[in-house]
Image (tube, rainbow, N blue to C red):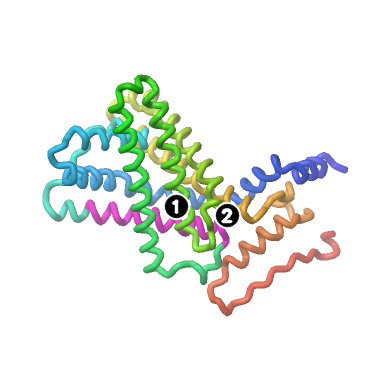
């Protein structure tokens, strides 16, 4: 038996290797890098207008409480380490109604586009047939709910940070306690988004593993983002700093999108038992497909069904000269 076959047999016998390999293979089978770029585009377009809209709403709701407004804004901006320090004193939308209207339209375009992209990604990952996906009107209604859940999650984390920061008796442990409180809020928000975005029978426990992984990855990315700001952006000139912020924000959003898609893949691979995969299946036709390989490829083929009366049958037969 060759070394490759021995390695393949070993990873198929041990789930600790077979499961992550199954997740990675499915990520690339679903063109996860391109899906990440799709989400990144719409998210990048919507970030700045949404922050301005949030600042405007807070200035209206918390009129007469400027300190609380600023604390909430600072806490929310800390979730975006690459641009947070650059927007510590954001101005609310002002000027002509035309400018405000354009800002709102751009924000809605980006936010709805990002939510639509998340739904598309989720349905691709869960291999939902196209005829079972929501129509354009229902999909946009779900997108609005996804945006609201995101906003509630960020606001909830920000509010918790503000409240805990005022508990002076906690001393130097306040930051650790704030993170401990924020983590389940983030996990719950991601669970709702994962469940709502999939046009399939997905229960909370089906998306819990991926939500936990996504929350951990987001915290790690925030740490890297803060390090990037302190080491690169802070030491750059005004012109170089602009490029550093834009490129850093693009990279940050792309990595966040990739983390969320990987988390979705974890949920699907675990739920549908799409592991172990054949080690060489992405590279050659001369392989023995596992049950997970067949289920994966059959699911992708059936996901292209456009009509309920359309039949898609998937067979795996090899010619004699390919045996």
Q: Position of residue 167 (x, y in %)?
A: 30, 26
Q: Secondary structure at mark 1?
A: helix
Q: Mark 1 Cα within 10 Å, few/some/many (few <14, many 20+)?
A: some
Q: Mark 2 Cα within 10 Å, few/some/many (few <14, many 20+)?
A: some
Task: Tell me: residue 209, above or below residue 200.
Answer: above
Q: Residue at x 23, y 54 (%)?
A: 104
Comparing marks 2 and 1, which lies closer to the viewer?
A: 1
Residue extending farthest bottom = 309
Q: Closer to the N terminus: mark 2 or mark 1?
A: 2
Q: Residue at x 52, y 42 (%)?
A: 212
| Residue 228 visible at all | no
Q: Position of residue 249 (x, y in %)?
A: 38, 38
Q: Residue at x 30, y 23 (%)?
A: 168
Is residue 320 toward the left or the right of residue 101 in the image? right
Q: Position of residue 2 (x, y in %)?
A: 85, 42
Q: Position of residue 207 (x, y in %)?
A: 53, 51
Question: Gap between marks 2 and 1, in whole Å?
Answer: 22 Å
Task: State which quadrant residue 201 falls in.
Answer: bottom right
- Asked if residue 111 lies in the magenta stretch, the reply is yes
Q: Secondary structure at mark 2?
A: loop
Foreground residue among 211 and 173: 173
Which residue is the site of mark 2?
Answer: 30
Foreground residue among 230 and 50: 50
Residue 96, numbered circle: none
Residue 192, numbered circle: 1
Task: Tell me: residue 241, above or below residue 278.
Answer: above
Task: State which quadrant residue 229 falls in.
Answer: top left
Residue extending farthest top = 172
Task: Tell me: residue 244, above or below residue 278.
Answer: above
The stretch of residues the image draws in magenta is 103-127
């Amino acid at each position: 038996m060759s070394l490759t076959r021995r390695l393949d047999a070993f990873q198929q016998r041990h789930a600790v290797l077979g499961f992550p390999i199954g997740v990675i293979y499915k990520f690339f089978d679903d063109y996860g890098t391109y899906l990440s770029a799709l989400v990144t585009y719409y998210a990048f377009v919507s970030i700045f207008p949404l922050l301005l809209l949030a600042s405007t709403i807070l200035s209206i709701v918390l009129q007469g409480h400027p300190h609380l407004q600023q604390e909430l804004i600072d806490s929310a901006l800390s979730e975006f380490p690459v641009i947070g320090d650059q927007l510590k004193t954001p101005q609310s939308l002002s000027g002509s109604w035309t400018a405000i209207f354009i800002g709102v339209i751009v924000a809605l375009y980006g936010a709805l586009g990002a939510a639509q992209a998340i739904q598309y990604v989720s349905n691709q990952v869960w291999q939902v047939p196209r005829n079972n996906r929501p129509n354009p009107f229902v999909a946009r209604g779900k997108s609005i709910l996804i945006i609201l859940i995101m906003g509630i999650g960020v606001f909830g984390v920000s509010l918790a940070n503000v409240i805990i920061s005022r508990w002076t008796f906690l001393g130097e442990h306040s930051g650790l306690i704030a993170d401990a409180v924020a983590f389940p809020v983030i996990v719950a928000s991601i669970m709702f988004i994962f469940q709502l975005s999939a046009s399939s029978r997905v229960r909370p426990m089906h998306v819990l593993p991926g939500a936990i992984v996504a929350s951990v990855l987001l915290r790690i990315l925030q740490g890297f983002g803060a390090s990037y700001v302190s080491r690169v952006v802070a030491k750059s000139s005004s012109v170089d700093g602009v490029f550093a912020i834009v490129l850093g924000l693009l990279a940050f959003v792309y990595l966040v999108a990739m983390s969320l898609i990987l988390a979705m893949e974890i949920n699907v691979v675990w739920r549908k038992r799409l592991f172990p995969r054949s080690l060489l299946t992405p590279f050659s036709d001369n392989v023995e497909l596992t049950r997970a390989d067949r289920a994966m490829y059959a699911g992708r083929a059936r996901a292209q069904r456009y009509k309920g009366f359309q039949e898609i049958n998937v067979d795996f037969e090899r010619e004699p000269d390919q045996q």
